[in-house]
Image (spheres, grey):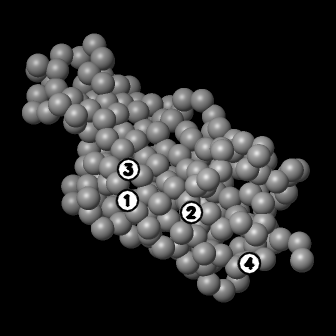
Amino acid sequence: MFGSVMTGGTAVALAAALLSSGTVTEERPPPGSVAIEMRTGSGWLCGGSVTSVAVAPDNSGFTTSYEGFPVRVGVGSKPGDARKNCQLTVDVRIPRDFTYVITGTEHTGYARLAKGATGQLTVGHYLQGAPGRSSRTYRFTGPYNDAWLASDFGDIGIIEYPPCGEQRLLTLTTELQVDAGTSDPATTTSELGLNDTGSNAIARYRLAWKRCPAV
């Protein structure tokens, strides 16, 4: 059973310079092939493992998977264990007559936080070479000992798209952080992770599509 997650702030919209003017409703995903190729992956949260990317059969989104290491403070922890990040850069290859935008993300994990300890998950994405970014933060407060689901799939709102005809690399960022707070790190351990025993960290990204005007 998933525990509740508190969200800090709302998603930050991409800058107007990146987006086309006006708003557009979602259209059907393009038929045929949409390919996403891994370019680079860095950060201790990724675990240095091979990352896989899988596109949904209907092109409505994609998932990433990697062996994510948890963050922890207290008994058994080392300096640097309290904060870890992962940055993945992917090449999204789409039909020329379409453009897309990420409209939602979903992450799952677990938290084992002592009373007084806190944890934080921050996820984001941006197109390389563009000025704007989108990010969202989820906060956890101890005592907490449960799995969690952090999702903004229900918060579509207004959809604005990058200009047509541009092919930019997409960067996906994930950061975990845990703080002892008022708990006693000499006698307690607090941990926050994206995967539990033996499973990979899986993130889901939802896409919205727009057909570009004929040139």
Residue 41 has which mark? 1
Vertically, is 56 above or below 32?
A: above
Residue corresponding to mark 4: 96
Specify whether residue 195 is in view. no
Residue 64 position, x and y percent, is 43, 63
Percent coordinates x, y for residue 39 in the rendering = 44, 67
Q: Residues within 10 Å of mark 3 (few under 14, many from 20)?
A: many
Q: Residue at x 31, y 41 (%)?
A: 84
Q: Please name the amino acid that badge 2 sits on.
A: Leu
What is the C-alpha distance between the residues marked 1 and 4? Answer: 26 Å
In the rendered image, the residue lying farthest to the front is: 129
Query: Residue beneath label 3, please?
Result: 86
- Measure the C-alpha gap from mark 2 to mark 1: 13 Å
Looking at the image, residue 62 lies above or below residue 134 = below
Distance in Å between CA atoms under marks 4 and 3: 30 Å
Between the C-alphas of marks 2 and 4, the distance is 15 Å
Q: Secondary structure at mark 4?
A: loop
Q: Amino acid at mark 3?
A: Cys
- The residue positioned 35% from the left and 25% from the top of the image is 118
